[in-house]
Image: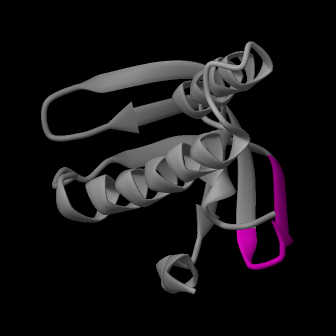
């Protein structure tokens, strides 16, 4: 899996992909243009995370599963607690996918 594809597995990425697929199927959009939109989405997500996110979050929870494959770490936590400067949120189950940011520029 390409590192950029991590963003496509997010809710917004999957919705974008579905919409583009429908547009290509109906002939509203060419497949080439749909691919260009997805590539731009990947670049925009990377840029936004690098330049606009300034807060830090600590995460605590019970480690259910972890995996390291193709330079990508995947963690599944249960009873997770996300805490930043202002607020704390409890989540029943969360999947965290992490990769080396240097791989994004390759």
Residue 50 location (% of width, % of height): 29, 65
Q: Quadrant of residue 43?
A: bottom left
Residue 42 vs 86, above or below: the answer is below
Image quarter where the N terminus lies is bottom right
Q: Is residue 75 magenta?
A: no
The stretch in magenta equals 65-72
At x 37% / y 49%, what residue is drawn?
58
51 and 57: which is toward the camera: 51
Look at 30% across and 26% down and name the residue there.
88
What number of labels is visible? Answer: 0
Q: Residue at x 58, y 44 (%)?
A: 33
**Pick the front one: 14 or 39:** 39
Note whether residue 59 is visible. yes
Image-based side of 65 in relation to 47, left or right: right
Residue 93 appears in the figure:
no
Q: Is residue 66 magenta?
A: yes
Which of the 4 image quarters holds residue 86? top left
Taking 75 as reference, is 90 left or right? left
Q: Quadrant of the C terminus?
A: bottom right
Out of 103 and 18, give the one closest to the viewer.
18
Q: Left or right: where does residue 3 sit relative to residue 36?
A: right
Q: Position of residue 60 (x, y in %)?
A: 51, 43
Residue 101 x/y as whole percent: 48, 77
As drawn, is 55 to the left or to the right of 97?
left
Q: Residue at x 55, y 21 (%)?
A: 91
């Amino acid at each position: 899996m390409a590192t950029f594809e991590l963003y496509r597995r997010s809710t917004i990425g999957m919705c974008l992909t579905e919409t583009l697929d429908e547009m290509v199927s109906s002939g509203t959009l060419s497949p080439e243009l749909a691919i260009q939109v997805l590539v731009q989405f990947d670049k925009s997500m990377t840029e936004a995370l690098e330049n606009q996110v300034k807060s830090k979050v600590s995460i605590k929870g019970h480690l259910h599963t972890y995996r390291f494959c193709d330079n990508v770490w995947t963690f599944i936590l249960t009873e997770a607690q996300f805490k930043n400067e202002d607020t704390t949120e409890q989540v029943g189950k969360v999947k965290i996918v992490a990769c080396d940011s240097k791989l994004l520029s390759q």
